Amino acid sequence: MLITRAPVRISFAGGGTDLPAYYQRHGGFVVSTSIDKYFYVHISLKSGRSIQISSSDYRAFSRVNKGEPPLWDGDMGLVKAVLHELGLDGGISLFLASEVPPGTGLGSSSTVTVALIKALSALRGMSLNSAEIASLACMIELEKLGSPIGKQDQYAAAYGGMNAITFTRDGVSVEPVAISAEAKELFQRRIMLFFTGGTRSANAILRQQSSNSSIDKGDTVAALHAIKAAAHDVKACLERGDLDAFGEILAETWEQKKRLAAGVSNPHIDEMYALARKHGVVGGKLAGAGGGGFLLLYCHEEHQPAVTKALEDAGLHRMEFGFDVGGPQILMNAFSRSAWRRTA
C-alpha cells in the first residue's frame, strides 16, 4: 500500500498572468498559499495485467488494460495521462479522493496531477524534487492533454507554503513570501472561505482569456497588467505586515478580474459579495478563474460572526482551514519497487 497527498491552494493575486498566452509576452507573477485541504492517492498492488481506478469525487470507476492505446477522455483522462507518462499499465489499483469538490477554484485538478506524480514516481523508485514534479505536471496538463490552463496551481501544490511565483518564457521561479510568523498567524485568522454551492469547469473562461491575451485585446491585457502589478503589491504588503492593505488590493483586483472574460462573476455572486462587504468584509474575490466555487474574503475577527451568519443564512457554507507548508507527501509506502514489478 502507498498513500500520498498534495494540498490545494488559495490564489491571492496574479491569477491569469500564469497563462502562457500572457506570460510568454509580458511575464507573469502570482502570490498564493497552499492550505490544509488535500487530494489523496491510495495505491495497492493487485494480480493481473490491468489498472483499476476509482474516484470518490466523480463517483467513477475505470479499468485500463495492458497494451491498450491511450485514451485520455472523460473524468479519468488526467489520471490515464499521468499513468501513461510514467510508464505504468498494469498490476495496481488506484483510489482517489479529495477534501474539496472539483471545480471550486482551489486548484484541485492540478493538485490531482501533482499527487499522482508523487505517488506513481515513488512506486517506480524515482525521486523527483518540487520543480521536477511541477514541470512534469504542467507538461502533462498543458501539452499532453491540451488543457487551456495556467501553471500556478501545479507549482503551488508541488512546493507548498506561501510563495511568489514568477513565469517567463525562459522558465518558472518560486520564492517564499517573507512574512513574519506573527503576521502570518493573524493573516490566516482574517481569511475566510465560503462555498457558493456551485462547481464549474473553468475551461471556457480560460480559453476566452487566453484568446484575448494572445491577440493583445485591450481590456483583457490591461486588466492582466493591473492584476500583475497588484500581485507585487500584495507580496510587499504581506512582507511588511500591512494586512489591511491586502484586503483593499483584493477588492480592487476583483474588479479587474471581472474584465478578463465573460462568466467570471454572475448576479448571485455579486449579491453575496455585496452582502459580505455590508457586514464588514474589507475585500474579496472568487477563488480560481471564476464562475463559482469558493468566495475568498479578508475580514477582521470582530466582524466575522456577522459575516458568517449573513452568508450562511443566504445559503453559503463557510469552510475552516489553515495554511499548509508541506507540499506533496508520502504518508505510507509499505511496498518496494520490486514488489510492484512482480505483480505487474
Image: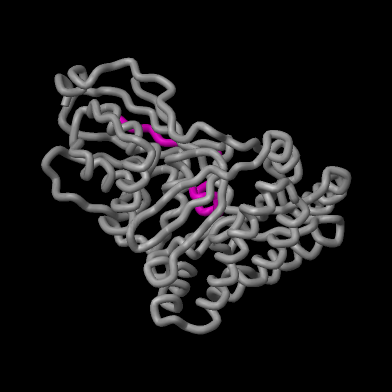
Main SS, magenta region, reads loop
**Image position, residue 200 (x, y; %):** 52, 59
Image quarter for residue 203?
bottom left
Tell me what residue is drawn at x 41 percent, y 36 percent.
96
**Image position, residue 171 (x, y; %):** 35, 55
Image quarter for residue 275?
bottom right
Q: Going by the image, does 57 lie left or right of 138? A: right
Q: Going by the image, does 185 lie left or right of 91? A: right
Give the residue at the far top of this rendering. Answer: 334
Can residue 100 be seen in this snapshot?
A: no
Q: Which residues are magenta?
A: 93-107
Image quarter for residue 80?
top left
Q: Is residue 119 magenta?
A: no
Q: Is residue 100 magenta?
A: yes
Q: Quadrant of the N terminus?
A: top left
Tell me what residue is drawn at x 53 percent, y 60 percent.
15
106 lies above or below 282: above
Tell me what residue is drawn at x 69 percent, y 64 percent.
269
132 lies above or below 224: above
Can residue 79 be seen in this snapshot?
A: yes
291 lies above or below 91: below
